Amino acid sequence: MSRDEQLKARWNLVVTKLSKQFADGEILDLDAIIYLIGVQELGQLSRSFKKDQKLDLMHIAICKLLTPYGYYELDFVDDEGWPHYKTLETLPHLKAGEQSVLMKEAIVNYFVETQYID
């Protein structure tokens, strides 16, 4: 199986499992999955979030997802438990499709590392 085929198969597995677990089978999109990762990384699963906090959660997720690629590093966790990252390297300018592939790959790797998928 080629790398692209493996990524596609694993991505579909992540989407299917998360959609069943969190959206009653309704298909979650990339942004929804990024948001879920942000909530997971914050560790405050049972609370409600305001709109600006939801954007912060997505930022946390993106930083966490791109840390293994050398773009971010965890700097500190504040008194309220929110992680803060520092930029190590500026993200390259990518086309929309390239950004999507990078994020899907990072999400798949995240869920492999957390043993959510094989």
Image (cartoon, helix red, strand yellow):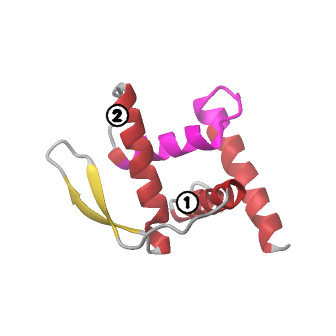
Three-letter code for the amino acid on which mark 2 is drawn: Gln
Q: Residue 52 at what x, y percent from top left?
A: 35, 32
Q: Residue 15 at x, y = what percent?
A: 68, 44
- The picture places residue 99, in percent across and down from the top left corner, at 63, 58
Q: Which of the image's four quarters has the N terminus?
A: bottom right
Quadrant for residue 45, please give it.
Answer: top left
Q: How far apart in space, not on screen, are marks 1 and 2 (Cα)? A: 27 Å
Q: Quadrant of the C terminus?
A: bottom right
Helix, strand or loop for disc 1: loop
Residue bearing the label numbered 2 = 53
- Name the residue furthest right: 1
Disc 1, disc 2: CB below 8 Å?
A: no
Disc 1 versus disc 2: nearer the observer: 2
Seen in the image, is 104 located left or right of residue 49? right
Residue 82 point in image, percent of width and height: 26, 46
Please, what is the three-letter code of the amino acid marked with disc 1? Gln
Q: Which residues are magenta?
A: 19-41
Q: Is residue 88 above or below residue 63?
A: below
**Secondary structure mainly formed by the magenta segment:** helix
- The dot on residue 115 is 1
